[in-house]
Image (spheres, rainbow, N blue to C red):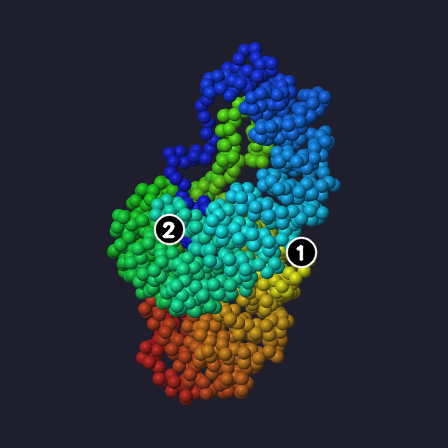
Amino acid sequence: RVSPLAARENPGSERPAKSQHPHLTMGRVVRAQQTYKAATGATVADLSQILTALLAADNDMRGSAEATLRVVARDASVVPALLTHARGDPDPQVRQLAAVVLKRRVLGHWPRLPRDAQEQVKHILLDGVVKEPVGLVRRSIADVVSKVAKATVPMGQWNALPEFLAQCTQSPEEAHRDVAFVIFASLTETIVSVMTQHFATLGGLFQNGLNDPSLKVRVAALRAVLSLVTNTTGEPNEVKIIRGLVPQIIATARNAIAAGEEDNAGLAFEVMDELIESRPKALSGHVPALVSFCVECANATRLGTVTRRRALDAVSFLARHKPKALLRAKLVQPLLRSLCPLVGEPKETDLAGEDDIDEAREEELQVQTVAARLVDLLALKVPARHVLPEVLRFASHALADGAANVSVKRRHAAVAVLGIVCEGCAEGLQRRAPEILPKVVESLRDPSPEVRGGAAFTLGQMAEYLQLGYDFPRMHRDVLPALFAVLPTEPDKRVQERMMYAMDSWLEQLDDEVAPYVEPLLRISYVALDSPDARPQVKEMLLSACASAAAAAGGAVHPHLPALLPRLERCLTATEDKDLKPRARALEVLGMLVSARGGRAAMEAHVPAIMAAADSGFDLDYGELREYGHGMYAEVAEALGEGFALYLPGCVEKAAASLRLDDGVVYDSDEEEHDRARRSAVPGGDSDDDGEDLSDSDGGGGNGNGNYSIFSGVVEEKAAACKAIASYAHHCPNAFKTHIGAFLNPMGDMADYMHEMVRSQAHHALARMAQCALKAAPPPSAEAFPIVDASLNATQRAALEDDDRDAVAAAMESAAEVIESVAASGGGGIRHLADAGHLEGLSDRCLAVLEGRAPCQEGDDEEHWAEEGADDADDGDDPDEEDEEAELGQIVLEGVAELLPALAAVGGAEFAPHFQPHFTALMRRTSGTRPEGQRSVSYATIVEVVRAIGPAAAPVVPLALPGCCREFGAETAGLRRNAAYCAGVMVEVGGAAAAPHRLDVAGALLPLLSAEETDRGVRDNAAGAAVRVLAADGFATARDTDAGPTLLAATLAALPIADDFEEAAATYGGLVSVFADPVASRVLARWAPATVALFARVVGDEYAKAREGWPGKDGASKVVDAGTIARMAAAIDAMRAADANAAEAAGGMTREQAAAVAEARAGNIPQP
């Protein structure tokens, strides 16, 4: 699902208009033209009559003249003849036409002209530049000068030209100065290449031009500067000269705006963009002035939308490519103070076709959108501590109690900006969510639709990026009821859509908690689905929310199937264009209903019909139906398992067809089409036998290259096809194994596809295919090794070449799955991985990521500008800047957190020496100046590697434990959770190396075990860590008469496990082991009854889950494993026999608990 903000970077996501010939809409258009014959016997001597005829109104006369000119123009003597007319004809129209035709013909004939004729042409051209009285003719002659100069100046054959132009720039005549800079603009590349030693001279000339009293000349000079900046080599001396031009560039733009010539001011923004991208050092010392000017323009409502947007775009360019320049200039906070009042939730894609938005309002919305994207960019590129305080300050003032008198625009900006920074400032916003969210929810009832829409947008962004369900599992109770309350009566359709987006995003975060919301959601959905007047967008978003609910807890939706399925069937039979998106979403709902827990039983009778409905969508030539069709096939395969074999051949064939789709088409640019039209209208524009390029263009868009466009929806369809193949390989491997060979090469190609979404899914598919092959032919058979190699080679290519973090993370996670499967298969598979270089190569790739050297991390620790000049003397670097990266870098570290432990598990103790550089890099990333999310991932990686290596990793334990314990006081629950788990495992594995720290860890865990710790996941992990500490080193802490009882009492108070059931085996099993130790059981005898009561409660709860239905989609994430349940039942019996107080506690079990223990004793408690 794509949020409104995510759509900001995907302007091509909308479906293109239907065409009778959809594959021809972007191709060349061949126009039928009348054919004219050239006049018989015409020569260059007839040129005067030809030119006159070319200006005639009669089409036939003009056509015949064009044909005649094509013949006559093959003679090289046409060059001096055209020049004669360009300089001497009394009619200015004829002079201009002669110059235009000469521009197109001169280079083709230039080598054939005698040297004296060439010199004569040069002399006449320069004379014309100075003496021609008509401006348009003078410009056309200047164009000829440019053409000739490009063929002569680089060869040293027109050395007088630069000096001539320099003299013109000093002329008292405005026209001379203007045309000189016009020629400079077209010749800068040519001149710079031969005048490097005279670059200072060029700089001085351009500086004078930018200071010229004539605005016309200043603008012409600005064009020349743009060309100069584009073509400079970047030598330090050149950069210094360009730096001196920056103040005049800004001043020229400011003067152009003051004169009402905003188009000319746009040139300054182009220069700024070019400097930021290619010559950033030239802006040294001028960044504050540049940003100040751009913000001034953006806030000037009197200016046109284009100018305001261009100003914001220039700052966006700076923020995207050189964010640390803004930090060093201390501009981020002032910039945000100016931007925050401008923003609104991005809605530019909504504007097309909205008849109720007037032109002025539409322009304002466009500025809002650009400002919003810039704030979002700052949040992503700049450390959150520089962004979030300013955003919160602005929002809190505008949304404070008693702020009803605040303007609508300001209230709207306040709620919207909170959503805009959710992705980039997720960590800080997550901590502040309890105080922020109520104000946003309250804004859902604001009188203004803009504010209500902004509030809904922000709620959706908070659900999408802040992971609030993890740290605040009950927060949905404050949001969803409020949304359900306001949605039915919301009069504004755009606000409705944002509310549905928010509802969908929050429902998607839920598990069993979604059940209370199913009925109100379906009630609203039925109204829209039953209404013929409901907008397709509304139906689509409601169906998306239904899919989220079904994915979270399909069992809660299944009772409503009799009312829901007929409505979905109506969607699946719709064929009008406007109904195809809802039809695609209906497929998604059905897929989720089938794959949900209990879905096979509830939906199996309907599977043939829904498969047929999905198949029929492939006949409509609509990419989104194919995309969601693949998604539905994947969900059905998950539900049916090998029972999907009946449908597999057709589904595999459709996936292969999607992977073979054309990605795009080469087509003519708008500029080429415009030039072609002009060539058909301007006489003499057709090609001649010399094959000369006759276009007016100087070749900027030429060289045979067209524009490349991706067909709308192809990326999503290919990604869905890859995901479907992964599902088939995973859920029905016996049926799919014969198809592996057919997809080996195509999926490898998809791993190198141009779009990261497809690459990510291809990596997952390759891993699933490898696992499927290993099941079909486990080692020592080598049959599976080609697909294993293909998957791991793709991962290495991604780590070495891919610049997208998400794709690299997906590749690493996939490689980890493959390595684990090879290890589980045995039979020498690991030896093959070592011999093929995969283990060493992947280890090196992990190290490169940890050290920040991977291509996908470019920019994380860069941007070291050489700031020069007195203006920068106080712009010292922030000592924390290098370490405090934007949180975007975390995703690829999470890939390492999966892959490195898998490599360690394969190597075991032998991996310990290889882990040392990785450990060093990981410890650097646990520095307190790093974002908490990054520290959390780093500790998680360390602990999993330590577990995999075992006691051989003991030397790193004393180095990591102190910092790990310090994180027990971290602000984010995720970091506290990981730190607790990490500390427990390191004490468990470290043995004697951890002994000096064991009691410190025990004491540090106590606050996490108390009621003061409100996050249940943290308490669960702390309890697991505490039990590991009690049992470590031969139950040393459990036998300690001081530390043992204190730690056990706190641990029992924190149990039972409520959230992280992965800790159940270690926690409950560890307690069983502690009380099985004779010494420890005597020291802890006082707590034996409480332990028995805990075991009885847990066994009883698990038995109840088995009878009443497990939580979650598959139930496995919220249960205790059968082996641990059996151990607790046996421990109850043993403790009852050994201790009278424990026996009394066992006797106090409820009837249900006693029955559950009896069933557990007999091994009769089933698992999901």
Q: Amino acid at mark 1?
A: Glu
Q: Earlier in the sequence, mark 1 or mark 2?
A: 2
Query: Which residue is tagged 2?
Result: 632
The residue located at (57%, 79%) in the rendering is 1000
Residue 1163: x and y in percent read 38, 72
Q: Is residue 1000 visible?
A: yes
Considering the numbered disc 1 on the image, is that residue within a helix, a strand or a loop?
loop
Q: Which mark is residue 867?
A: 1
Q: Amino acid at mark 2?
A: Met
Residue 777: x and y in percent read 50, 52
Tell me the quarter of the image containing the C terminus: bottom left
- Label total for image: 2
Q: Is residue 547 visible?
A: no
Q: Which of 549 and 152 lies nearest the eye of the viewer?
A: 152
Classify residue 353 as left or right of residue 1083.
left
Residue 371: x and y in percent read 48, 53
CA–CA distance in space, label 1 to label 2: 56 Å
The residue located at (52%, 38%) in the rendering is 707
Relative to 1025, residue 484 above or below: above
The residue located at (55%, 49%) in the rendering is 314
Classify residue 1151 as left or right of residue 163.
left
Considering the numbered disc 2 on the image, is that residue within a helix, a strand or a loop?
helix
Residue 575: x and y in percent read 31, 42
- Specify the quadrant of the image occupied by residue 1099: bottom left
